[in-house]
Image: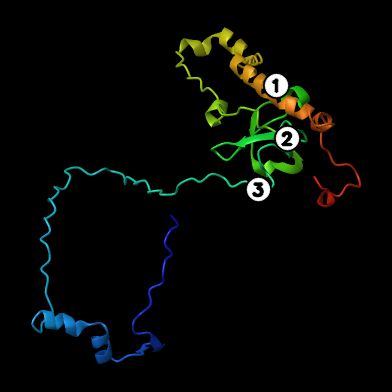
Amino acid sequence: MAPARKTHRTSRNPDLIRGVGKFSRSKMYHKRGLWAIKVKNGGVFPCYEKKPVAPAPVEKPPKFYPADEVKKPLINKHKAKQTKLRASITPGTVLILLAGRFMGKRVVLLKQLSSGLLLVTGPFRINGVPLRRVNQAYVIATSTKVDISKVNVDKFDDKYFAKEVEKKKNKGEGEFFEAEKEDKKDLPQEKKDLPQEKKDDQKAVDASLITAIEGVPELKFYLAARFSLKSGMKPHELVF
């Protein structure tokens, strides 16, 4: 059902000029029907008694007051809304990354996450770009599209990319003076391996995505090529 249109309320006595109404005081008395209300109530306007309001309970003042002023948190009624995407960015669009580790790489947009970030992939087997999140401010949308109807991305959300936070252990006094601990700190940290579950997810997405890419001639080589500007190229005249 369509929402009812809001009608602007207009005064019964419009102003001819500021402070001067169109109708007189006696005219408005009859226009508003106040005479009929008096007739029904014996020539007197009806008086309605106000309902008794229960008195508020008396609060006892506190015996102690804080030494410092305690600031009360401000009420924030702002509700976060999902970021609106540009009209050129739709699921399946080939994007060009403008910043980060994979700058200049072409990727395929899978969907928009609840945080507003874009879920993209290379795929990994073609140009080495894994499943990752990208802000739409750092991409260029091209006119090339890829059919992603057979790609299942339901399990991917912002929690999927959250990093595991390790709890810090409390060190004793003796640990600060041990030479072995200091030697271990100087050594480079070992690179953590990606969980096997995430590797399998990447392979599943690549398998269904590559089948769609191979169905379009030259699309695989287009995604594998890195975008870059050369001397004499005018970015504002390029058509992506």
Q: Earlier in the sequence, mark 2 or mark 3?
A: 3
Please tell me in which quadrant of the rendered image residue 147 appears: top right
The image shows a total of numbered marks equal to: 3
Q: Residue furthest front?
A: 1
Q: Secondary structure at mark 1?
A: helix
Could one spot residue 11 in this view of the protein? yes
Q: Quadrant of the C terminus?
A: top right
**Is residue 140 rendered to the left or right of residue 161?**
right
For label 3, the crowd category at 10 Å Cα-Cα, with few meaning under 14, some 14 to 19 and many 20 or more, is few
In the rendered image, residue 214, in percent from the top left (x then y), is placed at: 79, 27
Could one spot residue 129 in this view of the protein? no
Asked whether disc 2 touches disc 3, contact meaning CB atoms under 8 Å apart, the reply is: no
Residue of label 2 = 146
For label 2, the crowd category at 10 Å Cα-Cα, with few meaning under 14, some 14 to 19 and many 20 or more, is some
Asked whether disc 3 touches disc 1, contact meaning CB atoms under 8 Å apart, the reply is: no
Name above or below for residue 26 compared with residue 82: below
Q: Residue at x 37, y 48 (%)?
A: 75
Q: Which mark is residue 8?
A: none
Q: Secondary structure at mark 2?
A: loop
Q: Secondary structure at mark 3?
A: loop
Q: Nearer the viewer, residue 218 or 240?
A: 218
Please tell me in which quadrant of the rendered image residue 217 appears: top right
Kind of residue at badge 3: Arg
Residue of label 1 = 207
Q: Tell us which disc is closer to us: 2 or 3.
A: 2
Residue of label 3 = 86
Q: Residues under labels 2 and 3: Cα distance? A: 18 Å
Name above or below for residue 23 compared with residue 179: below
Kind of residue at badge 2: Val
Q: What coloring was used for the rendering?
A: rainbow
Please tell me in which quadrant of the rendered image residue 150 appears: top right
